[in-house]
Amino acid sequence: MAAIKRIVAAGAVAAIICSFIPGKASAEDYSKVEGYIHSFNNNVSVYSGVFALNKDVDLDTSVYFKYNIDLINPDTGGGEGGGGGDDEGGEDDALNKSRAVSAVSGASSAVSSAGGSSATDTRHALTLGATRNFNNIIGAEAYLDYSTESDYRSITPTVTLKKDFFEKNTTLTLGYSRNMDTVSGRFMDNAEDKTADNFFVGVTQVLSPFTIAQIGYSRNESSGFQSEGIRLVPVDGVTADTCTDETATCVEEVFPDTRSRNAYLAGVNHYFSGGLLDRSSIKLTARYYNDDWDITSYTGDVEYYKYLSEEWLLRLNYRYYTQTAAFFVKDSYSSVDEFKSSSPQLEALDSNLYGAKLAYLFKEGEKISDTVSLGTIEGKYEYYTETIGVNAHIIMAAIRLIF
């Protein structure tokens, strides 16, 4: 299941269906290499590598390239039951934890033939893009994302327009993207298609030399095969731990064929100058989400940045998320129910994310060759918890080069 599309589809992270400012490139020649490790409490591991390159063609045009690879459970044991860690919830608990992989790491959940967490998979994702400033009248960005893995393929073109007003104190952003996905999960007889149209409008307003406010709205309309084809639902009194193969009492998930989603975003960034908080800033973001599956969610994000010295920058962050369940989610199903789900990401849940990142900013001119300078070296640690029994440790290291 393609990572970005899985994140959009999962209720636990549906509020992230669109960023405030969807642009990806900046007006600077740079390359960046990042490495991530996501370690879950049921022996699921995801190792990710990212390489990004941005190149200015001229003063008004730049091109962008990014490659991402996710290695899910490479050479890990864990057994078919998916147990491990400090929890002993059995097969259901292992299933819940493995399903959260996509929500936390951005990679697919790894599920073995028996539904546990010992399967392996590899996801490749490629992004190509370009930005253009048209005579300081309007800015345009175009991107094409492609990702593939064993049971999911996705192609997503994106177009974004930006316009400044009032001496560049106000910026209007309009965005559109279309997801074109092909799903071929383990319990599916044939591959199925899913499409989604995504619309975004946002306004960034300078309130003072130290404060910027942002508001945004995004709309997602998806149709086609909404499930992932990797889960079975026990019906008519059968227990979940017996559903390893499709039978009359262990059936495929059935979701509505369409889904409409809305997300409303508001935030403020403030820079502190002088006093105890000198050379620090805070970013506060709130998101409200609802859809026609009766899921509503609230997200609160806090990020605090502080220069510890001329070279060292610290970021502390916290995110809280809560959601209600989809209208068709219930404790047990019968074979006559129209819709059926075994996805914990459609249930009512809460999650917390705590993190810290430390970056070293090299002084301008610190070169490693005649054409390449050192930019930054970064390290990050985050801890994620979810009420379905998931917790994860997230570690990141990155280096940024300027040329």
Image (spheres, rainbow, N blue to C red):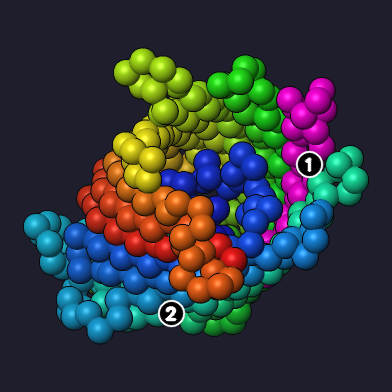
Helix, strand or loop under label 1: strand
- Residue 57 location, quadrant: bottom right
Amino acid type indicated by mark 1:
Lys
Q: Which residue is at a point 72% across and 62% down the rendered structure image?
A: 56
| 212, above or below 305, in the image | above
Residue 289 % position (x, y): 55, 35
Residue highlighted by disc 1: 162
Q: Which residues are magenta?
A: 154-181
Residue 297: tell me if it is visible.
yes
Mark 1 crowdedness (10 Å alpha carbons): few <14, some 14-19, many ≥20: many
Front position in the image: 29 or 18: 29
Q: Which residue is at a point 80% across and 33% down the rendered structure image?
A: 164
Q: Which residue is at a point 82% across and 23% down the rendered structure image?
A: 166
* Image quadrant in which the C terminus is located: bottom right
Front position in the image: 240 or 287: 287
- Residue 41 location, quadrant: bottom left
Amino acid type indicated by mark 2:
Thr
Residue highlighted by disc 2: 122
Residue 207 % position (x, y): 64, 18
